[in-house]
Amino acid sequence: MMKRTHKCGQLQSEDVGQAVVLMGWVRRHRDHGRVVFLDLWDRDGIVQIVADPAIYEGAYEVAQSLRDEYVVAVQGVVRERPAGAENLALATGAIEVAAARIEVLNTVSPLPFPVEDAASVDETVRLRYRYLDLRRAEMQQNLRLRHEVVKGLRNALDEATFLEVETPVLTRSTPEGARDYLVPSRVHPGEFYALPQSPQQMKQLLMVAGVDRYFQIARCFRDEDLRADRQPEFTQLDLEMSFVDQEDVLDLTEGMIARVVKAVQPDRELLTPFPRLTYDESMALYGTDKPDLRWGMAFVDCTELLGATEVRIFRQVSAEGGAIKGFRVTGYSGATEAELETLQVLSRELGAAGVIWFHVGEGTLEAPVARHLAAEEQRMLIRAFDAGPGDQLFLVAGEPTTVHRALDGLRREMGRRLGLDDPAKLAFAWVVDFPLVKWDAEGQRWDAEHHPFTHPKMEDLAILETDPAAVRADCYDLVCNGWELGSGSIRIHKRELQTQVLALLGYTTETAEASFGHLMEAFEYGAPPHGGIAIGIDRLVAILAGTDTIRDVIAFPKTRQAVDLMMRAPAPVSSAQLGEIHVRVVRPRPARSDAGAE
């Protein structure tokens, strides 16, 4: 086999006249009778190869036999393309390589889909043949982008005197919110390891150990229902710092993210400092703790204004302690009835009774409901939304949580319809002052809003037991373009407070000791104040790549059903293997069918 001298995408005009050996895949093969052209591709790009029998007969004969995706080595000389034949779309478009010798390194079976057209192929097929899908330029760019992002994060933290420390993948199952992936132990029958949902407790223990500033690119595992921004295994930048407060963590994280974005995409517009919203503000204005701030449409609370009108649904919701809120869409008066009806359907899918819309005219409202509002009430509603002629108002009435969920979904849909969700824009923001706990009505217990190790705000400690719902946490989320990008907090570092919080969450002395005794014991040996954050690398790269699913930036992802179509995992294992780890499979009973019963 010949020895490669250059990458395909590296050749430029200054290489004209140079003898080179290239290796890669045939991307396009064009036989023009007495001359064969082919595009040769490798990770660094594409270059045109010309096989001309008038120059090298042997290379021409081999070139005639090639097909797309053959793996070949090409020996030849770089030359300028003829005037007018340049390809400005290619980095190598000014030159080509006249082939003197072509060696076939491997042939190709019939392809399941053309690699160049893979983007239009059903995703399940592309995942089945992921190694072919990854040959696409877009996917190669995503992998390169991911590499650059991770490298930038590492460099920034290294300069900030962080140590990269690996923590175990086989650990203990502890209650952290999601289901664990369990690994049975062969040498300890009936006992299990768990794959870490995050390195949370380990990084806190590293602070007790005096590491002071820790990070790692951590693999995390959660057995939960999937969606576009979730995978059963994912990667996060995990970091922790000693002797810090919330401002220290936010400032370091913000500077690091801004630096990395500017390094990998210097043309991106990125405004710093990132705006901050309290949790209460975020919920009140956008109905979510991860708002998309690329556009406005903040919510307006109309409960007091409309609760006293003659509109029955408004009066009823107000009397029952519900909420009436909405948002304004500027210049949406051209919406068709069909378009408005799809919003009605969406609002019901999100749990609301429906959405009420008003078209704003010259000081009046146009809608079936509007006739039940007095002229002054209409003018007051228009002023409340700061609306003008041609605007559209969308309102939802009901239980506050339902209203927020429905309006959040409607607002995101309007952003998509109006093209306001431009992936080229980055809208980072901090959401701070989360509640420490939330009430689980079904389980009749308090659950941690973030995790059990989050420190309550010092000024709220006095009401921890008397009014838990009002206790705020030193907890913060980094959001971007409607995605939760990172989450962190200042941690509890004293056993007494950790015991108190666990008791609030329903842990007895025995269950707290069984689940977290190792951590609380460590707090007795000089645990410093500490805090940190975890940034979702998959989500960060997906946002920068302009894709709406993290599967596009993971080399070998799983489907929404947590299936690896390429490796055909999960899969059964032999009874011998099960015996070695002392596990017996109990199949679920088939659902009872009464079909045909009399």
Image: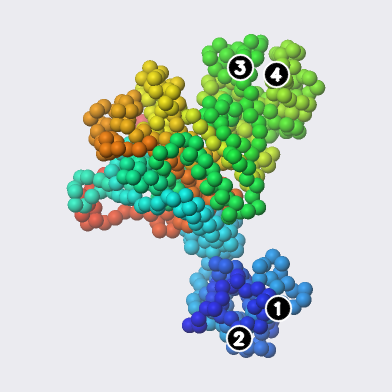
**Is 192 displayed left or right of 60 in the figure?**
left
Residue 564, position in %: x, y? 42, 54
- Tell me which amino acid carries mark 2: Ala
**Mark 1 to mark 3 CA distance (whole Å):** 72 Å
Structural distance between the alpha carbons of marks 2 and 3: 79 Å
Furthest-right residue in this view: 362
Residue highlighted by disc 4: 381
Instruction: Where is residue 339? Give x, y as percent.
Output: 68, 34
- The mark nearer the N terminus, 2 or 1, is 1
Residue 125: give x, y in percent of width and height.
51, 57
**In the picture shown, does residue 472 fall above or below 135?**
above
Q: Which mark is residue 303?
A: 3
Task: Please name the residue that numbered disc 2 is placed on.
Answer: 100
Q: Is residue 368 above or below residue 572?
A: above
Q: Which residue is mark 1?
A: 80
Q: Is residue 243 above or below residue 579?
A: above
Element carrying mark 2:
strand
The residue type indicated by label 3 comes to: Thr
**Residue at point 60% right, 70% down?**
9
Q: Nearer the viewer, residue 294 or 233?
A: 294
Q: Residue at x 71, y 78 (%)?
A: 80
Q: Point out the tag, 1 or 4, that comes first from the N-terminus.
A: 1
- Work out which quarter of the rendered image holds the C terminus and state it: top left
What's under tag 4, amino acid-wise?
Leu
Give the mark nearer the N terminus: 2 vs 3. 2
Mark 3 → mark 4, Cα distance in angstroms: 11 Å
Q: Are marks 2 and 4 in contact (CB under 8 Å)?
A: no
